[in-house]
Image (cartoon, rainbow, N blue to C red):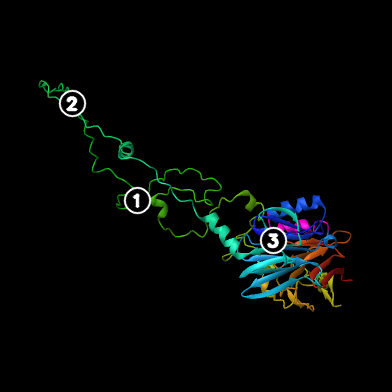
């Protein structure tokens, strides 16, 4: 609930909605209707509606938001706000500021937008012609208490009979089981005897092995004079020895025999892609060389690349962008820059290699770390670092627009970045 002053039709109007109030120098009914919907929507939505026509066409205003937490206050142009906080009264003005002054009031007892003298009338929501509006913290606490407190519970007037009915209906009755009446005795049922299974025929005993039977793999005896011929083994494929195929060998194959020097060396079954690439030598190889190993000395010498054939070192890309500060300095964007009253690169850990650029004004209305400017690819990106007064950008031939806090925005050459209080940055070519 707000208190507004009675006034005839003039240039000032009060727009109230919810816990927000706006004092604005506006006479157009269509604009006032749009501002009424924006005030009901929120604080940021109201600012967007006020600067929708551009910063140069934004009227003077004083906006107050007491919906949650600290009271938000924004003042622009010729409007003013009288604040009573902590037993001290002060006036908030926006003189000398190109955009507006925005602040937070954590312990405000009352705030008056515009003129404060004269009788006032209550206003909950709507649009009226007035030169001032008053908000007090006591009214907000009463509104909150009325919203949170629940209505007193009214007890029902019931008699003992109704209470008994409720108790009986709440707990359903459990029926007791009826007692079983004993009847005539019934003889026990005896199941019919199952027929005995027929005896299974006994299996014939297996023939006992001959004790003189000779098993070559398990029995060791004297080596006979003539060794029996080994059983023929299946011919192995060309890839079995490479992939671990199982080969069955007899005990006779494990016997160690002196090597016959005149005997030809055993042949190895190799795949075709090996034998075709490295044909075996005609004569017998000496030493441990198997004929398949290629020594480094047998390779033809290859010419080493000269220094002239090497790719020349790449030169660093030339600097393409720079920013011109309002105090006349020119800062190249070879690395990201953090601009503010007392900037700190630690506030933006995502920008590697960023350097601080200090920019001060007479009013000191810009934040310590106000805005970050960086080059990404072929574009310049501007990010408002949650500054107190916000950041405005003016693209060439476009109307001014306010940046969203913490949201990177791509700009072009010639864009003016307005930090408030006359502090600006202009994006230029580095050439």
Q: Quadrant of the C terminus?
A: bottom right
* Residues drawn in magenta: 41-53
- Give the SS element for disc 2: loop
Instruction: Please identify the dominant SS of the magenta region.
Output: helix
Disc number lying in front (3 or 1): 3
User: Would you say the residues marked 3 and 1 are in contact, meaning their CB atoms lie under 8 Å apart?
Assistant: no
First of labels 2, 3 by sequence position: 3
Q: CA distance from mark 2 to mark 1?
A: 56 Å
Please give the residue where the numbered disc 1 appears in the rendered image. Answer: 225
Query: Which residue is the site of mark 2?
Result: 199
Left or right: 215 as drawn, with respect to 137:
left
- Badge 3 is on which residue? 120
Foreground mark, 2 or 1, reads 2
Figure quadrant of residue 428 = bottom right
Give the label, 2 or 3, closer to the camera. 3
Depth order, front residue of 255/60? 60
Residue 4 vs 237, above or below: the answer is: below
């Amino acid at each position: 609930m707000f208190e507004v002053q009675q006034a005839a039709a003039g240039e000032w109007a009060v727009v109230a909605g919810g816990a927000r109030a706006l004092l604005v120098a506006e006479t157009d009914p269509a604009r006032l209707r749009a501002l009424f919907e924006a005030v009901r929507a929120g604080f940021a939505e109201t600012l967007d509606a006020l600067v929708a026509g551009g910063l140069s066409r934004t009227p003077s205003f004083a906006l107050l938001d007491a919906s949650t937490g600290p009271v938000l206050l924004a003042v622009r142009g010729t409007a003013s706000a009288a604040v009573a906080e902590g037993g001290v009264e002060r006036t908030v003005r926006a003189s000398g500021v190109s955009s507006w002054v925005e602040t937070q009031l954590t312990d405000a007892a009352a705030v008056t937008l515009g003129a404060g003298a004269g009788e006032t009338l209550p206003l909950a929501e709507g649009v009226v012609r007035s030169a001032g509006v008053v908000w007090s913290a006591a009214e907000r606490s009463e509104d909150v208490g009325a919203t949170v407190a629940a209505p007193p519970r009214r007890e029902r007037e019931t008699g003992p009979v109704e209470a008994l009915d409720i108790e009986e209906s709440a707990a359903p009755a459990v029926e007791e089981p009826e007692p079983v009446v004993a009847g005539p005795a019934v003889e026990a049922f005896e199941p019919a005897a199952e027929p005995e299974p027929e005896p299974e025929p006994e299996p014939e005993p297996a023939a006992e092995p001959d004790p003189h039977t000779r098993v070559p793999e398990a029995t060791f005896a004297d080596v006979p004079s003539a060794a029996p011929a080994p059983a023929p083994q299946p011919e192995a494929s060309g890839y079995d020895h490479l992939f671990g195929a199982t080969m069955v060998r007899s005990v006779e194959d494990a016997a160690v025999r002196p090597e016959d020097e005149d005997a030809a060396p055993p042949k190895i079954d190799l795949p075709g892609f090996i034998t075709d690439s490295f044909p075996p030598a005609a004569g017998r190889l000496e030493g441990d060389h198997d004929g398949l190993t290629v020594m480094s000395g047998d390779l033809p010498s290859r010419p080493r690349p000269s220094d002239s054939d090497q790719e020349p070192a790449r030169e660093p890309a030339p600097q393409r962008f720079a920013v011109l500060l309002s105090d006349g300095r020119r800062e190249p964007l070879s690395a990201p820059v953090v601009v503010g009253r007392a900037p700190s690169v630690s506030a933006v850990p995502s920008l590697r290699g960023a350097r601080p650029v200090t920019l001060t004004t007479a009013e000191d209305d810009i934040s310590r770390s106000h805005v970050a400017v960086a080059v990404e690819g072929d574009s310049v990106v501007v990010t408002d670092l949650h500054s107190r007064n916000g950041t405005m950008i003016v693209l060439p031939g476009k109307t001014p627009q306010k940046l969203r806090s913490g949201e990177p925005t791509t700009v072009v050459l010639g864009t003016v970045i307005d930090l408030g209080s006359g502090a600006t940055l202009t994006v230029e070519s580095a050439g």
